[in-house]
């Protein structure tokens, strides 16, 4: 961040405008933007691309801080003043990177800002599924007392399979190892072998699916990972295994997942993201007792929200003030801007 201003001095008059798509940023990020002459305006997180483009055009925005919404070429091209896009998180599948690159606009990610929070929810869902928390809670609240017939699973000694061994996947594996689980990871670009934390890293996804008691998804959404977990791959999992998704919803073919859960191909699923968000009220997943669902909040812990907002705001201000950006955070390859 830039140097702090004198505590008693008023913020400068705004010279730049940034559109935030979604809920209000944490106070620290709001104050940082204001102290650096940036006016933040907000759009509803579920506004359409056409609505976002109209707002960007009307307000002649200089920057875009993306929490939600589809940021397509029309949004990116709406304001000739646009210099930078920052994602309040790490996944950029809702941003047209090619359109941003063509306009010379860098798309900056908040690297590792929410990694611990996401990893913690992945482990929470895994434990809840393995210990039948949802089923037992429902039974007790409906007058049953299955104490004498219940036999639970052991977490220690079970295999935790990670698909995508990046920052979040590594943290999830570390937490699983702390519970005494064996950890196995698939990543097409990670070095195969035994990682520093003892996780066995392989290049064969099928091996992870066949051996794991929990398969936890931590891969980005790309053309290669869209519907990665389809009917064929779900059928490779153990019948008493669980699937956990704190990545992007479309990594899973939901129709295939519904069939696998209904037919006992796998034992259950813990889902924080969905192909359509919010999912429709009559989604067939809701009729299945072996599903735990959360509303895409894996990265919404207090520390994660602070980290994502501050990193995003800092990245935007750096570009608007001519200091450039951290190349490691840039998700695209922006061409040179026209003079």
Image (cartoon, helix red, strand yellow):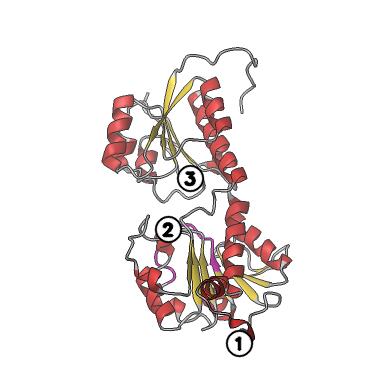
Q: Earlier in the sequence, mark 1 or mark 3?
A: 1
Callout in the foreground (1, 3): 1
Which mark, by number, is residue 222?
Answer: 2
User: Do residues under tags 2 and 1 come within 8 Å of each other at their CB atoms?
Assistant: no
Pointer 1 residue:
149
Count of numbered labels shown in the rendering: 3
- Is residue 221 located in the magenta-colored stretch of the structure? yes
The extreme front residue here reads 143
Magenta residue span? 216-229
Is 138 placed above or below 189 here? Answer: below
Secondary structure at badge 3 equals: loop
Q: Image point 41% across, 60% down: which residue?
A: 274
Q: Image point 50% across, 19% down: which residue?
A: 37
Which image quadrant for residue 7? Answer: top right
Pointer 3 residue:
331
- Counting other residues with Cα less than 10 Å from the Cα at mark 1, is it few (<14), some (14-19), or many (20 or more)? few
Q: Where is residue 217 in the image (x, y as percent from the top left)?
A: 52, 64
- The N terminus is located in which quarter? top right
């Amino acid at each position: 961040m830039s140097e702090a201003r004198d505590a008693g001095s008023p913020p400068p008059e705004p010279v730049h405008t940034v559109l935030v798509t979604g809920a209000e940023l944490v106070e620290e990020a709001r104050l940082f933007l204001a102290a650096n002459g940036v006016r933040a305006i907000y759009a509803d997180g579920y506004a359409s691309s056409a609505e976002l483009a109209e707002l960007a055009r009307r307000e002649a925005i200089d920057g875009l801080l993306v929490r939600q919404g589809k940021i397509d070429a029309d949004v990116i091209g709406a304001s000739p003043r646009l210099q930078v896009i920052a994602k309040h998180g790490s996944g950029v599948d809702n941003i047209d990177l090619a359109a941003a690159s063509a306009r010379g606009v860098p798309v900056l990610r908040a690297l590792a800002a929410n990694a611990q929070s996401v990893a913690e929810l992945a482990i929470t869902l895994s434990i809840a599924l393995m210990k039948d928390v949802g089923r037992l809670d429902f039974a007790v609240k409906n007058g049953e007392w299955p104490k004498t017939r219940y036999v639970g699973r052991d977490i220690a000694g079970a295999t935790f399979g990670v698909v995508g061994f990046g920052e979040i996947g590594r943290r999830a594996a570390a937490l699983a190892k702390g519970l005494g689980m064996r950890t196995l990871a698939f990543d097409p670009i990670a070095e195969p072998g035994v990682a520093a934390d003892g996780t066995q890293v392989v290049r064969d996804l099928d091996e992870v699916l066949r051996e794991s008691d929990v398969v936890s998804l931590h891969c980005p959404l790309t053309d290669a990972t869209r519907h990665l977990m389809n009917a064929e791959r779900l059928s490779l999992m153990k019948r008493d295994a669980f699937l956990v998704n704190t990545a992007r919803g479309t990594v899973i073919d939901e129709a295939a997942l519904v069939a696998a859960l209904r037919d006992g191909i796998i034992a259950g699923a813990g889902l924080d993201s969905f192909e359509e968000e919010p999912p429709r009220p009559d989604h067939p997943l809701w009729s299945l007792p072996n599903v735990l669902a959360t509303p895409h909040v894996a990265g919404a812990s207090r520390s994660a929200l602070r980290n994502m907002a501050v990193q995003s705001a800092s990245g935007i201000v750096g570009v608007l003030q001519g200091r450039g950006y951290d190349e490691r955070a840039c998700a695209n390859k922006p061409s040179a801007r026209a003079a």
